[in-house]
């Protein structure tokens, strides 16, 4: 029985018949370029008008409709759909506004890859209206990931969480305590990283400059309370100054949620200048703690700091200069000791005069003038001069050093008053351990005539070891100051 006749470019037919027994039937196209048309064997009329099957070149098979080639199998076995020059084993090329699609007749659902409505897209639609649907990815008959209609990437879940005004754009749900990680394998110093980029542009790839205070990114740590997702802690990065070209000052802010609260409160920040603020948001006189080039603890109406040594007696605070221990505060039972220390205060020369050379350990005498520091109140610190009276009862202490820690008031100095220090002895004057000292009237000290502590008594010699000698022959020895 004849079931299909193919008409060649010359007269005659290529006829496909059903064999008497089961077997394979073949159609052999002309070996030279040509086409065949499909005809109905019962009435010898062409069917599928405009449809041709051809072999435009040796070992090449083509199918055309409406005068245009649609399918080609070339001599290398490559299948081309929409292209006459396939370069892949299966090469589908879109030449029209229609894409590559898969359709299920049962529920009228489609999966499309191509140019739809002048936009290249990968999309899924459902129903007679062609409404777009999420794209889901399955393994082992279980959904693993999806891109929903809002553009959210969801891994391990089919719905995005929303909480406290936030909705996850990328969400990863892990079963059974599974973890996520970023791994980098490369033979250099670089590792894995996450990049948070903020711009004030409203379009993708924009570089409109950010502004001071803008949030650059956040990491939220959340928990569920039985009905809602609540933030327990967060880390924020913000612009911390005015940005410029290749200049992006930034700060980190650490926040935690207090017991009984539903939102985090800032607890600590690291500023762009490297200073760490705890319990405060500025470097000024705001309650809290800050550290950077200095440590600053401020309290409104409570203790500023506690130093609590548990279990045993010993040092509470150690003071060092250039890594060498110079003094300490220690505790023994109920007694607190200040070790290797003395009391001192600020002062100025008469009329606030400029700096002049004063030898360390020289005796200073109080004046009626009070120190002045701009509009700052001062009710107890008077100015001083180098003592020029023998047995001077107005001796305030000895010169320690000029104050170099203040760039505004540069003519201030420290006067050592009470405690362990050194004192300057005049050239040729001999002292012994235990001597009580008084002013010699030239900035140096000399032994008293008796061993009674009087108003003129300045210090008591604790050692005759000479700590330094000056060009005029005067020298310094250790003492306990008794100036006040």
Image: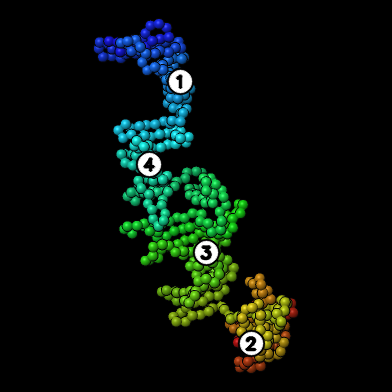
Quadrant assignment, res 69? top left
Q: Mark 2 or mark 1: which comes first in sequence?
A: 1
In this picture, residue 13 sits left or right of residue 200: left
Q: Secondary structure at mark 2?
A: loop
Q: Which residue is mark 4?
A: 134
Q: Nearer the viewer, residue 67 or 86?
A: 67
Q: Mark 3 or mark 2: which comes first in sequence?
A: 3
Q: CA distance from mark 4 to mark 3?
A: 46 Å
Q: Which residue is mark 2?
A: 458
Q: Nearer the viewer, residue 469 or 285?
A: 285
Q: CA distance from mark 2 to mark 4?
A: 90 Å
Residue occupying the point 62% across, 82% down = 378
In this picture, residue 321 sits left or right of residue 442: left
Q: Which residue is mark 1?
A: 68
Q: CA distance from mark 3 to mark 2?
A: 44 Å
Q: Foreground mark, 1 or 3?
A: 1
Q: Is residue 288 visible?
A: yes
In this picture, residue 278 sits left or right of residue 420: left
Q: Secondary structure at mark 1?
A: strand
Q: Mark 1 or mark 4: which comes first in sequence?
A: 1
């Amino acid at each position: 029985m004849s079931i299909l006749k193919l008409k060649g470019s010359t007269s005659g037919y290529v006829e496909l018949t059903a064999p008497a027994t089961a077997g394979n039937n073949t159609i052999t196209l002309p070996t030279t370029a040509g086409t065949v048309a499909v005809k109905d064997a019962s009435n010898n009329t062409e069917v599928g008008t405009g449809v041709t099957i051809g072999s435009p070149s040796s070992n090449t098979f083509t199918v055309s409709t409406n005068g245009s080639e649609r399918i080609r199998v070339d001599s290398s076995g490559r299948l081309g759909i929409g292209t006459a020059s396939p370069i892949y084993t299966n090469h589908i090329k879109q030449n029209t506004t229609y894409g590559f699609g898969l359709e299920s007749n049962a529920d009228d659902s489609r999966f499309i890859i191509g140019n739809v409505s002048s936009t290249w897209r990968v999309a899924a639609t459902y129903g007679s209206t062609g409404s777009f649907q999420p794209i889901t990815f399955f393994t082992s008959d279980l959904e693993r990931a999806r891109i929903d209609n809002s553009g959210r990437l969801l891994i391990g879940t089919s719905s995005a969480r929303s909480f406290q005004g936030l909705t996850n754009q990328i969400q990863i749900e892990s079963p059974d305590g599974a973890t996520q990680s970023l791994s980098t394998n490369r033979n250099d110093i670089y590792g894995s990283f996450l990049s948070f980029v903020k711009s004030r542009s409203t379009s993708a790839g924009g570089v409109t400059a950010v502004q001071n205070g803008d949030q650059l990114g956040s990491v939220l740590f959340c928990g569920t309370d039985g009905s809602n997702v609540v933030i327990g802690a967060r880390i924020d990065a913000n612009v911390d100054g005015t940005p410029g070209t290749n200049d992006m000052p930034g700060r980190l802010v650490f926040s935690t949620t207090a017991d009984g609260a539903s939102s985090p409160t800032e607890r600590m920040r690291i500023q762009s200048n490297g200073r760490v603020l705890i319990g405060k948001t500025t470097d000024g006189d705001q309650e809290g703690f800050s550290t950077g080039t200095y440590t600053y603890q401020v309290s409104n109406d409570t203790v500023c700091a506690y130093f609590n040594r548990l279990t045993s007696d010993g040092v509470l605070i150690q003071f060092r200069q250039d890594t060498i221990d110079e003094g300490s505060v220690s505790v023994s039972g109920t007694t607190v000791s200040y070790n290797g220390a003395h009391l001192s205060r600020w002062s100025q020369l008469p009329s606030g005069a400029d700096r002049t050379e004063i030898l360390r350990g020289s005796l200073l005498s109080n004046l009626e003038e009070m120190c002045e520091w701009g509009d700052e109140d001062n009710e107890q610190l008077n100015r001083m001069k180098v003592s020029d009276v023998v047995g001077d009862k107005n001796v305030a202490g000895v010169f320690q050093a000029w104050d170099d820690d203040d760039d505004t008031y540069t003519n201030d100095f420290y006067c050592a008053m009470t405690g362990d220090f050194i004192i300057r002895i005049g050239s040729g004057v001999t002292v012994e351990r235990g001597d009580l000292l008084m002013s010699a009237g030239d900035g140096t000290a000399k032994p008293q005539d008796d061993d009674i502590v009087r108003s003129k008594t300045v210090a008591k010699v604790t050692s005759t070891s000479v700590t330094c000698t000056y060009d005029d022959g005067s020298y310094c020895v250790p003492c306990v100051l008794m100036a006040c």
